[in-house]
Image: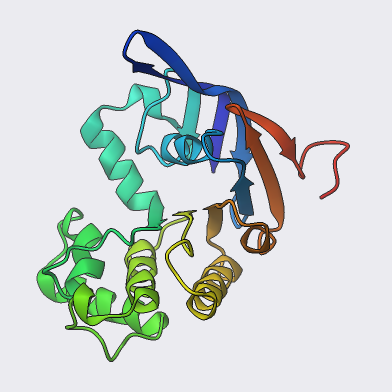
Amino acid sequence: MIEAVDLHRTYTLGDSDVGALRGVSLAVGAGDYVAVTGPSGSGKSTLMHVLGALDRPTAGIVRIAGRDVNTLNDAELAELRNATIGFVFQSFALLARTSAVDNVAMPLLYRGMRKSVRRKLAEEALGRVGLGHRLDHRPNQLSGGEQQRVAIARALVGQPTVVFADEPTGNLDTRNGDEVMKLLGELNASGVAIVLVTHEPDIAAHAARQITIRDGRIAYDSAAPGEAA
């Protein structure tokens, strides 16, 4: 479903080039549950952004649903991302003055769906995460855990094949973090692949596959030959 071959991502900071990714190759299949861990600055969030087509590699290949992202223009890339990928971020990334249901419906706007259809699908997604009673509440009227559940509903409303979750419990207490991980597990059980970026071992333990990034390279992959699954 997502394949990366010899990925490199280099940033220029002042007079220096910094290699955030240095020759990363991996594949994420349908229904996989992958945790990407590593110390701060290791390249794990950069990897998520490149695999999720939020950023382009400096070198190497990323294929999403068989399509090489390097051959797509920005509009084609946005369309592919919208059709296949959902995102959940530590900061929730909700529009502050917009209701929960309209935040969730936002990805569907770019598919040209009628407002009534977008509303119906968004209501169903919010019901799925236990927020059917909070449709018209704005983010500042919701707890942190509820805001993250809105973000999960937004990620799943378009029926993606993969969801990228970058430190999804980082701003939550233990109880709300557990609820978010339960929702991600249920989403994975329904057939959606999850790529979870985290620095917390207990959060990473929810995933069936563990990948460790150090200095922009894969230091460990539990799915690699000769390594424990």
- Eyeballing the image, is 181 above or below 73? below
- In the rendered structure, the answer to whether residue 164 lies left or right of residue 201 reads left
- In the rendered structure, the answer to whether residue 183 lies left or right of residue 82 reads right
- In the rendered structure, the answer to whether residue 166 lies left or right of residue 14 reads right
Question: Where on the picture, by quarter, is residue 215?
Answer: top right
At x 31%, y 50%, the residue is 82
Furthest residue toward right: 226
Q: Nearer the viewer, residue 181 or 226?
A: 181
Q: Is residue 59 visible?
A: no
At x 85%, y 47%, the residue is 228
- Eyeballing the image, is 175 above or below 213? below
Residue 159 in percent (x, y) is at 39, 63
Residue 143 in percent (x, y) is at 32, 79
Residue 227 in percent (x, y) is at 85, 41
What is the quadrant of the N terminus in the image?
top right
- Eyeballing the image, is 38 above or below 6? below
Q: Is residue 67 visible?
A: yes
Residue 184 in percent (x, y) is at 53, 68
